[in-house]
Amino acid sequence: MGLLVQPHVLDRAAQIPGARDSGLMGRWIYGAPESTLGDREIDTEPPSGPALKAWDHAVTSILALPRRPEQRPIIHLSHEAHLELRELRARLEPLQKEVVGRYAHMTDWTGKLAGTTMRVAGLYHLAQGHRHDTSINLETMRMATTLARWATAQAEYIHRSWRDTPTPEGVEHVLKWIRARKIRSFTRRELARVVQNAKWYSPMALDDALAELHAARWIASIAETDANGRSKPTGRYLAHPSLLPGDSHD
Protein backbone atom coordinates (compact mmCIF):
# COMPACT_ATOMS: atom_id res chain seq x y z
CA MET A 1 0.00 0.00 0.00
CA GLY A 2 1.34 3.43 -0.94
CA LEU A 3 -0.25 6.70 0.13
CA LEU A 4 0.56 10.23 -1.06
CA VAL A 5 -0.66 12.67 1.59
CA GLN A 6 0.02 16.22 2.71
CA PRO A 7 2.25 16.62 5.80
CA HIS A 8 -0.63 17.95 7.93
CA VAL A 9 -2.50 14.67 7.35
CA LEU A 10 0.33 12.75 9.00
CA ASP A 11 0.46 15.26 11.85
CA ARG A 12 -3.27 14.84 12.52
CA ALA A 13 -3.02 11.05 12.28
CA ALA A 14 -0.23 11.03 14.88
CA GLN A 15 -2.50 12.97 17.27
CA ILE A 16 -5.23 10.29 17.20
CA PRO A 17 -5.35 8.77 20.71
CA GLY A 18 -3.50 5.46 20.68
CA ALA A 19 -2.25 5.81 17.09
CA ARG A 20 1.37 5.67 18.17
CA ASP A 21 1.02 3.54 21.30
CA SER A 22 -0.80 0.84 19.33
CA GLY A 23 1.93 0.78 16.69
CA LEU A 24 -0.09 2.21 13.80
CA MET A 25 2.29 5.06 12.99
CA GLY A 26 5.32 2.83 13.40
CA ARG A 27 4.39 0.50 10.55
CA TRP A 28 4.98 2.84 7.61
CA ILE A 29 8.03 3.75 5.58
CA TYR A 30 7.91 7.53 5.38
CA GLY A 31 9.29 9.78 2.68
CA ALA A 32 9.33 13.57 2.86
CA PRO A 33 10.85 14.77 -0.42
CA GLU A 34 11.74 18.40 -0.96
CA SER A 35 9.25 20.35 -3.05
CA THR A 36 10.24 20.71 -6.70
CA LEU A 37 7.79 23.57 -7.26
CA GLY A 38 9.54 26.18 -9.34
CA ASP A 39 12.03 23.71 -10.81
CA ARG A 40 9.72 21.14 -12.39
CA GLU A 41 10.13 19.96 -15.98
CA ILE A 42 7.15 21.05 -18.04
CA ASP A 43 7.25 18.28 -20.63
CA THR A 44 8.39 15.00 -19.13
CA GLU A 45 9.11 11.82 -21.02
CA PRO A 46 6.71 8.90 -20.43
CA PRO A 47 8.11 5.70 -18.89
CA SER A 48 10.22 3.75 -21.37
CA GLY A 49 9.04 0.50 -22.89
CA PRO A 50 11.72 -1.62 -21.17
CA ALA A 51 10.90 -0.10 -17.77
CA LEU A 52 7.19 -0.84 -18.19
CA LYS A 53 7.96 -4.35 -19.38
CA ALA A 54 10.27 -5.02 -16.41
CA TRP A 55 7.64 -3.74 -13.97
CA ASP A 56 4.91 -5.85 -15.56
CA HIS A 57 7.14 -8.92 -15.45
CA ALA A 58 8.00 -8.42 -11.76
CA VAL A 59 4.37 -8.00 -10.66
CA THR A 60 2.94 -10.82 -12.78
CA SER A 61 5.77 -13.18 -11.73
CA ILE A 62 4.93 -12.63 -8.06
CA LEU A 63 1.23 -13.17 -8.73
CA ALA A 64 2.03 -16.38 -10.62
CA LEU A 65 3.85 -17.98 -7.69
CA PRO A 66 2.09 -21.21 -6.64
CA ARG A 67 -0.19 -20.79 -3.67
CA ARG A 68 -0.60 -23.38 -0.97
CA PRO A 69 -3.54 -22.46 1.25
CA GLU A 70 -2.58 -25.16 3.72
CA GLN A 71 1.00 -23.91 4.08
CA ARG A 72 2.35 -20.39 4.29
CA PRO A 73 5.64 -20.15 2.38
CA ILE A 74 8.64 -19.08 4.46
CA ILE A 75 11.56 -17.26 2.85
CA HIS A 76 14.85 -17.88 4.63
CA LEU A 77 17.91 -15.66 4.86
CA SER A 78 21.33 -16.79 3.77
CA HIS A 79 24.05 -16.63 6.42
CA GLU A 80 25.55 -13.52 4.79
CA ALA A 81 22.16 -11.81 4.58
CA HIS A 82 21.54 -12.58 8.25
CA LEU A 83 24.86 -10.94 9.20
CA GLU A 84 23.97 -7.85 7.16
CA LEU A 85 20.65 -7.50 8.96
CA ARG A 86 22.34 -8.14 12.30
CA GLU A 87 24.78 -5.30 11.66
CA LEU A 88 21.89 -2.91 11.00
CA ARG A 89 20.22 -3.96 14.26
CA ALA A 90 23.48 -3.63 16.22
CA ARG A 91 24.01 -0.07 14.98
CA LEU A 92 20.42 0.89 15.71
CA GLU A 93 20.04 -0.61 19.18
CA PRO A 94 22.09 1.85 21.31
CA LEU A 95 20.45 4.79 19.55
CA GLN A 96 17.07 3.75 21.01
CA LYS A 97 18.05 4.22 24.66
CA GLU A 98 15.44 6.05 26.67
CA VAL A 99 16.03 9.82 26.88
CA VAL A 100 19.65 9.79 25.71
CA GLY A 101 19.26 7.87 22.46
CA ARG A 102 19.11 9.71 19.16
CA TYR A 103 15.89 7.88 18.31
CA ALA A 104 14.41 7.84 21.83
CA HIS A 105 11.44 9.87 20.55
CA MET A 106 10.55 7.39 17.80
CA THR A 107 11.15 3.90 19.19
CA ASP A 108 7.64 2.91 18.08
CA TRP A 109 9.10 3.15 14.55
CA THR A 110 12.70 2.03 15.00
CA GLY A 111 11.58 -0.94 17.09
CA LYS A 112 9.86 -2.32 13.99
CA LEU A 113 12.61 -1.48 11.51
CA ALA A 114 14.26 -4.91 11.50
CA GLY A 115 10.96 -6.58 10.65
CA THR A 116 10.20 -3.98 8.00
CA THR A 117 13.64 -4.52 6.46
CA MET A 118 13.11 -8.29 6.29
CA ARG A 119 9.75 -7.84 4.57
CA VAL A 120 11.26 -5.42 2.06
CA ALA A 121 14.07 -7.91 1.40
CA GLY A 122 11.45 -10.58 0.76
CA LEU A 123 9.69 -8.36 -1.77
CA TYR A 124 12.98 -7.55 -3.50
CA HIS A 125 13.77 -11.27 -3.55
CA LEU A 126 10.52 -12.14 -5.29
CA ALA A 127 10.63 -9.12 -7.63
CA GLN A 128 13.97 -10.36 -8.96
CA GLY A 129 12.34 -13.61 -9.97
CA HIS A 130 13.62 -15.80 -7.15
CA ARG A 131 11.37 -18.48 -5.71
CA HIS A 132 10.19 -18.39 -2.12
CA ASP A 133 12.02 -21.65 -1.41
CA THR A 134 15.43 -20.07 -2.14
CA SER A 135 17.31 -18.00 0.43
CA ILE A 136 17.62 -14.22 0.30
CA ASN A 137 21.21 -13.43 -0.67
CA LEU A 138 23.55 -10.71 0.59
CA GLU A 139 23.06 -8.40 -2.39
CA THR A 140 19.30 -8.37 -1.90
CA MET A 141 19.57 -7.77 1.83
CA ARG A 142 21.96 -4.89 1.21
CA MET A 143 19.34 -3.32 -1.03
CA ALA A 144 16.87 -3.58 1.85
CA THR A 145 19.25 -2.23 4.51
CA THR A 146 20.15 0.68 2.23
CA LEU A 147 16.47 1.53 2.01
CA ALA A 148 16.20 1.13 5.80
CA ARG A 149 18.95 3.68 6.43
CA TRP A 150 17.32 6.14 4.04
CA ALA A 151 13.92 5.54 5.63
CA THR A 152 15.34 6.13 9.11
CA ALA A 153 16.48 9.61 8.17
CA GLN A 154 13.06 10.31 6.65
CA ALA A 155 11.23 8.98 9.71
CA GLU A 156 13.42 11.08 12.01
CA TYR A 157 12.38 14.20 10.10
CA ILE A 158 8.69 13.25 10.26
CA HIS A 159 8.73 12.31 13.95
CA ARG A 160 10.47 15.53 14.91
CA SER A 161 7.28 17.46 14.11
CA TRP A 162 5.23 15.17 16.39
CA ARG A 163 6.99 16.13 19.59
CA ASP A 164 4.84 17.61 22.32
CA THR A 165 6.85 20.84 22.40
CA PRO A 166 8.12 22.71 19.35
CA THR A 167 11.81 22.44 18.61
CA PRO A 168 13.66 25.76 19.05
CA GLU A 169 14.22 27.34 15.66
CA GLY A 170 18.01 27.43 15.95
CA VAL A 171 18.45 23.69 16.52
CA GLU A 172 18.48 22.71 12.83
CA HIS A 173 20.79 25.63 12.03
CA VAL A 174 23.34 24.53 14.63
CA LEU A 175 23.16 20.86 13.61
CA LYS A 176 23.76 21.77 9.95
CA TRP A 177 26.73 23.90 10.96
CA ILE A 178 28.27 21.07 12.99
CA ARG A 179 27.81 18.57 10.15
CA ALA A 180 28.92 20.87 7.33
CA ARG A 181 32.01 22.19 9.15
CA LYS A 182 32.80 18.87 10.88
CA ILE A 183 32.85 20.67 14.21
CA ARG A 184 34.05 18.49 17.08
CA SER A 185 33.96 21.12 19.81
CA PHE A 186 32.95 24.77 20.14
CA THR A 187 32.17 27.47 22.67
CA ARG A 188 28.97 29.45 22.97
CA ARG A 189 30.85 32.56 21.95
CA GLU A 190 32.18 30.88 18.79
CA LEU A 191 28.70 29.68 17.87
CA ALA A 192 27.19 33.11 18.52
CA ARG A 193 29.57 34.68 16.02
CA VAL A 194 28.48 32.13 13.39
CA VAL A 195 24.71 32.55 13.83
CA GLN A 196 24.43 36.21 14.86
CA ASN A 197 23.03 37.24 11.47
CA ALA A 198 20.42 34.49 11.32
CA LYS A 199 16.79 35.62 11.44
CA TRP A 200 16.03 33.51 14.49
CA TYR A 201 19.04 34.65 16.50
CA SER A 202 18.89 36.30 19.87
CA PRO A 203 20.91 35.43 22.98
CA MET A 204 17.82 33.76 24.48
CA ALA A 205 17.07 31.83 21.26
CA LEU A 206 20.65 30.59 21.16
CA ASP A 207 20.43 29.42 24.76
CA ASP A 208 17.16 27.62 23.98
CA ALA A 209 18.77 25.84 21.02
CA LEU A 210 21.79 24.79 23.08
CA ALA A 211 19.53 23.56 25.88
CA GLU A 212 17.51 21.45 23.43
CA LEU A 213 20.64 20.00 21.82
CA HIS A 214 22.11 19.22 25.24
CA ALA A 215 18.90 17.57 26.46
CA ALA A 216 18.75 15.44 23.31
CA ARG A 217 22.44 14.47 23.82
CA TRP A 218 23.50 15.93 20.49
CA ILE A 219 26.09 17.93 22.40
CA ALA A 220 27.79 17.56 25.78
CA SER A 221 29.14 20.41 27.89
CA ILE A 222 32.53 20.37 29.55
CA ALA A 223 33.89 22.80 32.12
CA GLU A 224 36.84 25.00 31.18
CA THR A 225 39.03 26.81 33.67
CA ASP A 226 41.54 29.61 33.36
CA ALA A 227 45.12 29.61 34.63
CA ASN A 228 43.87 30.30 38.14
CA GLY A 229 41.44 27.39 38.14
CA ARG A 230 38.33 29.54 37.81
CA SER A 231 35.50 28.48 35.48
CA LYS A 232 35.44 30.38 32.20
CA PRO A 233 32.17 32.15 31.35
CA THR A 234 32.06 30.53 27.89
CA GLY A 235 31.62 26.79 28.32
CA ARG A 236 32.81 24.38 25.66
CA TYR A 237 30.57 21.85 23.96
CA LEU A 238 31.45 18.54 22.33
CA ALA A 239 29.47 17.29 19.31
CA HIS A 240 28.08 13.76 19.42
CA PRO A 241 30.24 11.44 17.23
CA SER A 242 27.21 10.46 15.12
CA LEU A 243 27.10 14.02 13.74
CA LEU A 244 30.57 13.68 12.28
CA PRO A 245 31.62 11.95 9.04
CA GLY A 246 31.84 8.20 9.09
CA ASP A 247 28.54 7.49 10.89
CA SER A 248 26.08 5.58 8.70
CA HIS A 249 23.06 7.23 10.37
CA ASP A 250 23.97 10.77 9.28
Image (cartoon, rainbow, N blue to C red):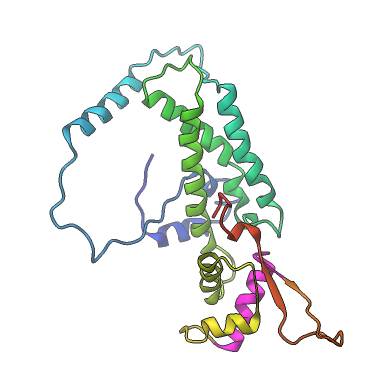
Give the side of residue 44 with respect to residue 138, left or right: left
Give the side of residue 215 with respect to residue 181, left or right: right
Say which quadrant the N terminus sits in: top left
**Rendered image quadrant of residue 98:** bottom right
Above-or-below relation of 186 to 243: below
Above-or-below relation of 19 to 232: above
* Dominant SS in magenta: helix
Say which quadrant the C terminus sits in: bottom right
In depth, the one of 58 and 221 nearer the eye is 221
- As for residue 207 lying within the magenta part, the answer is yes
- As for residue 179 lying within the magenta part, the answer is no
Magenta part of the chain: 202-220
Residue at the (34%, 50%) spot, across then down: 4
Residue at the (72%, 80%) spot, across then down: 235
Q: Residue 149: horizontal and vertical position, in percent?
A: 51, 46
Q: Residue furthest left?
A: 43
Q: Residue 17: horizontal and vertical position, in percent?
A: 56, 56
Above-or-below relation of 100 to 149: below
Q: Residue furthest right?
A: 229
In depth, the one of 180 and 250 nearer the eye is 180
Residue at the (40%, 60%) spot, across then down: 7
